[in-house]
Image (spheres, grey):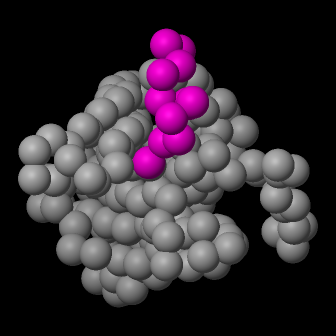
């Protein structure tokens, strides 16, 4: 969870940390704080892991959620936040050949931000599909297709809980897990 001390930081960053703590409690992914980059005066980084609901040992997706904050330069300003995210997920063979995969993954991000996050600016990023095929002495290894989504944006407020929820939603979408309310069981598909 978010353990950065709030007494040592500016009020807007403290509010952001509180919002992240509150949101992290309700996510359906495992989240832990990790060392943050020093790209801004104040920062916090979270690492998330999504495991298969039927097998906790099988990781479906992972990623990072980083908040960068530079304090305001005047009494009137809130300061500048920047959120930087990464989501990685292994794809099934059928999804991996979809020519619209990059656009679909980017749409998951934009729709989740519209649904969960507050106003934001300067959204940008990339979607990468990696196909790994083993050869020679390691040819018995199964092929692997991974999706990687990288994005960043500038939130207009310190209420970053919805931004964290949007990131978790994208992680679940990339892993192929449906968005269902907490406590609702998903039945396996019939063979």
Q: Position of residue 59 (x, y in %)?
A: 47, 66
Determine the residue located farthest toward the top in the rendered image: 99
Residue 183 seen anywhere in this rendered image of the structure: yes
Residue 20 seen anywhere in this rendered image of the structure: no
Q: Residue at the location (35% across, 44% down)?
A: 144
In the rendered structure, the answer to whether residue 182 lies left or right of residue 100 reads right
In the rendered structure, the answer to whether residue 163 lies left or right of residue 6 reads right
Q: Look at the picture and state if 38 lies above or below 128.
A: below
Q: Position of residue 29 (x, y in %)?
A: 57, 69
Q: Look at the picture and state if 30 lies above or below 101.
A: below
Residue 97: say if magenta: yes
Q: Residue at the location (42% across, 59% down)?
A: 62
In the rendered structure, the answer to whether residue 168 lies left or right of residue 9 reads right
Q: For residue 94, what is the image quadrant?
A: top right
Q: Nearer the viewer, residue 131 or 39?
A: 131
In the rendered structure, the answer to whether residue 117 lies left or right of residue 101 reads right
Residue 19: say if magenta: no
What residue range appears in magenta?
90-100
Q: Position of residue 95 (x, y in %)?
A: 55, 30
Q: For residue 147, what is the image quadrant?
A: top left
Q: Residue at the location (57% across, 56% down)?
A: 168
Q: Look at the picture and state if 97 lies above or below 90.
A: above
Q: Position of residue 158 (x, y in %)?
A: 50, 55
Q: Nearer the viewer, residue 11 or 102?
A: 102
Q: Residue at the location (24% across, 38% down)?
A: 133
Q: Nearer the viewer, residue 18 or 186?
A: 186
């Amino acid at each position: 969870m978010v353990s950065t001390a709030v007494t040592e930081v500016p009020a807007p960053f403290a509010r952001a940390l509180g919002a992240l703590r509150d949101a992290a409690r309700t996510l359906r992914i495992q989240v832990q704080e990790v060392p943050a980059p020093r790209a801004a005066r104040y920062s916090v980084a979270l690492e998330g892991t999504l495991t298969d609901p039927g097998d906790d040992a099988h990781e479906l997706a992972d990623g990072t959620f980083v908040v960068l904050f530079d304090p305001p330069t005047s009494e009137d300003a809130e300061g500048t936040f920047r959120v930087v995210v990464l989501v990685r997920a292994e794809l099934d063979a059928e999804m991996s050949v979809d020519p619209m995969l990059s656009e679909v993954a980017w749409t998951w991000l934009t729709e989740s931000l519209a649904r969960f996050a507050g106003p934001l600016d300067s959204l940008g990023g990339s979607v990468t599909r990696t196909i790994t095929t083993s050869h020679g002495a390691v040819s018995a290894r199964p092929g692997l297709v991974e999706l990687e989504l990288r994005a960043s944006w500038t939130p207009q407020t310190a209420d970053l809980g919805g931004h964290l929820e949007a990131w978790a939603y994208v992680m679940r979408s990339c892993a192929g897990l449906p968005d269902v309310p907490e406590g609702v069981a998903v039945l396996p598909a019939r063979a």
